[in-house]
Image: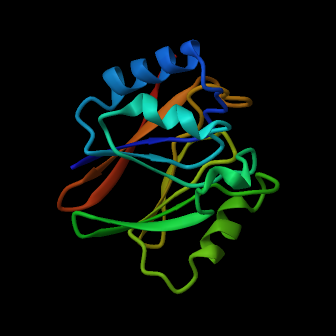
Amino acid sequence: MVIGVVSDTHLRDNSASWQFLNRLREEFFQDAAMILHAGDLVDPAILDAFDPIPVVAVRGNMDPASSGLPLKRIIHQAGFRIGLIHGWGSVAGLEERIRREFYGEDLDCLVFGHSHQCANHHYGRTLMFNPGSACDPRQAPFPTVGRLYLEQTLHGEVLRCD
């Protein structure tokens, strides 16, 4: 099973945003069973651009509280437990703060955003996965998205998307 992963898109609901997200869906997520969005959508209406692929999202610090999106969640797929959260505060210490939010949970993967910098490494047995930002890479050298592969094991891939 393949899961597409995006974060920090910071897009408004307009035709340019939809064109960009349609390109991501067609080029990077065409075989994805679902997409995880780790927050900072800015406008939740943009999630419809991924249709017909189902999207599971959380609220980031730039998203309106009225979006109805939770701050964190756990997704169960193909026998794996995946935590999903945006993150907050300084990039320094970000992973430690988000791990504490899931203290006591036996996660196979923890997907997060906020830093706009990709991550794909293990902390203990948990894969720490940040797809970076497809739209606003900030200090990263290029925009990125991610893919999770749920097979015998769970592993991730970060893809350059400029």
x and y percent of residue 155 in the render?
33, 53
Residue sticking out furthest to the bottom: 104
Q: How is the image coloured?
A: rainbow
**Depth check, front residue: 70 or 123:** 70
Q: Residue at the location (26% across, 29% down)?
A: 30
Observer-nearest of 64 and 91:
64
**Which image quadrant is residue 112 in?**
bottom right
Q: How many marks are shown on the rendered structure?
A: 0
Vertical comparison of 28 with 88: above or below: above
Can you say whether 126 is above or below 56 in the image? below
Picture residue at 66% right of the left edge, 39% below the top: 116
Residue 28 figure quarter: top left
- In the picture provided, is 96 more to the left or to the right than 69? right
Horizontal side of 78 relative to 6 (left or right) equals left
Q: Residue most toward the right? A: 90
With respect to residue 19, does 45 lie above or below? below
Relative vertical location of residue 78 with respect to residue 137 in this rendering, above or below: below
Q: Say whether residue 138 is left or right of residue 123.
A: right
Q: Is residue 69 left or right of residue 154?
A: right
Q: Nearer the viewer, residue 131 or 16?
A: 16
Place of residue 65 in the rendered image (x, y in percent of width and height, measured from the top left): 72, 55
Residue 135: x %, y % from top left? 61, 25
Which residue sits furthest left? Answer: 152
User: What percent of the width, then of the height, locates residue 156?
Assistant: 37, 48
Residue at 56% across, 20% down: 17
Along the line of sight, the residue nearer the viewer: 158 or 7: 7
